[in-house]
Amino acid sequence: MRIALGVGGGIAAYKSAEVARALQQLGHEVQVILTRAAQEFIQPLTFAALTNHKVITGLFSQTSAQDTLSSAVEHIAVAKENDALVVAPATADLLAKFAHGLSDDFVSTLYLAFTGQVILAPAMNNAMWQHPATQANIEILRERGCVIIEPDSGWLACGTMGEGRLADPVRIAERVDSLKRQKRDFEGEVLLLTAGPTQEPLDPVRYISNRSSGKMGYALASAAAKRGARVLLISGPVNLPPPHNTEVISVRTASEMRKAVMDHLAEATMIIKNAAVADYYVSSVPQQKLKKTAARVSLELDPTPDILAEIGQLKGDRLLIGFVAETQNLLEEARRKMITKNCDMVVANLVSQEGVGFEADQNEVDMVIRSGQVIHAGPADKREIAEQILDQVAVLRLTIRSVESPV
Ligand SMILES: Cc1cc2nc3c(=O)[nH]c(=O)nc-3n(C[C@H](O)[C@H](O)[C@H](O)COP(=O)(O)O)c2cc1C
């Protein structure tokens, strides 16, 4: 594979020579680009000798007439020719430029022109790394689909101890290698995915809802899109940016969610119903805001439509994955749901644990499969749990489809 390696102006720039070498040892061709600040730390000649390629040192750095002719718009040519853009070290400055779309040097201009996988390995002093501005930029870039290879902890060049040291160059190269070899095992699939909570109005300003943040569903949507699926994400109200390469259909109530699911069911080849849909709603919502009085009020609630059960009836040969969130008897409930709702797998979430499940970034789940097998995952970041769930979906798909179409 062809990899563009951008080197930022940090003290760890010397280690990027090892990154280039390790990538080459894994069989990749490497085109190095040094920012002006990087050249204060390491010479282009080092990389030219290692990679056998001219090193790019600036947006306007062509030196010969031939260079100018062959690559007049070199950042676009480099963007087209390479399969991945790796930036190591990614300085605080480069992260800020990428996050906010600045393009006043070759690496940041290439970042904007590049449509493939971007992998960033930040390195800086630990206060710079932990600064809210840097962390906000990291979050923006992550949400946009960049892979962040987190810095290590240890002694930093500035003489302090903490997080900020460039990840091990060989580890960076191996991560890039594994990402580029990442399976596109959901290519051709259309995944209908529900996520987030629903809100059921009580009056024009109040509603009943739950603590679902949508993070698990959004992580699944993003992972499935990366693995090649067309993702139709039906989302309740959440505070999350739309995942890259997905089609988001925003809904508010359980009945709107049901309608959106039914409208798109025919397109889907697999369905993951991760949304925490309200179980009850008020059928006759008053037109005007309810006034507060000293009197006790009681609410009359009706059950919401059982979307999962309805999909279960109509699913045909589509794969159906449900979620169950319980505070007790988790596995029994997951098994009951799988049978009664005709699911192929139910992912069980124990929501009474601190730090995992609702609202948290981490999760710990049991995947209950029709065969009776239970596969545990986590505790881990929801993005990692999403990958593990999709791995099981891929296995299930193979089993189910090969049973249904014997040769
Ligand atoms: C000795 C020295 C070491 C530096 N190390 C780092 C570093 O490790 N990480 C970082 O983000 N910035 C570091 N900086 C600051 C950057 O060099 C500076 O922000 C520069 O504008 C980054 O340029 P770039 O966008 O080309 O990476 C360092 C500066 C100096 C003078």
Image: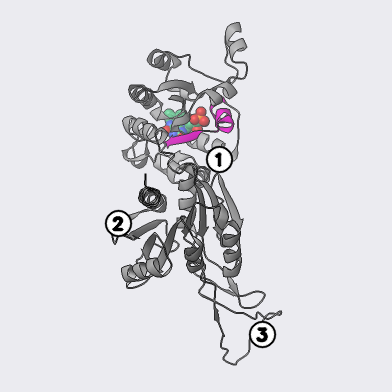
Q: Is residue 121 rendered magenta in the image?
A: yes
Q: Is residue 234 left or right of residue 119?
A: right
Query: Residue at 38% of width from left, 62% of height from top?
Result: 346
How far apart marks 3 and 1 lie (CA) works out to 46 Å
> Residue 375 bears which disc, if any?
2
> Does the magenta segment cover residue 222?
no
Q: Secondary structure at mark 1?
A: helix
Query: Which stretch appears magenta?
Result: 106-122
| Contact flag, marks 3 and 2 (Cβ < 8 Å) | no
Q: Nearer the viewer, residue 251 or 203?
A: 251
Label 2 environment density (alpha carbons within 10 Å; few <14, some 14–19, many ≥20): some
| In the rendered image, the vertical position of residue 95 relative to residue 48, given as above or below | below
Residue 260 position, x and y percent, is 60, 61
Q: Which residue is mark 3?
A: 291
Secondary structure beneath dot 2 equals: strand
Q: Which residue is mark 1?
A: 99
Give the colour scheme shown: one colour
- Measure the alpha-carbon separation of dots 1 and 2: 38 Å
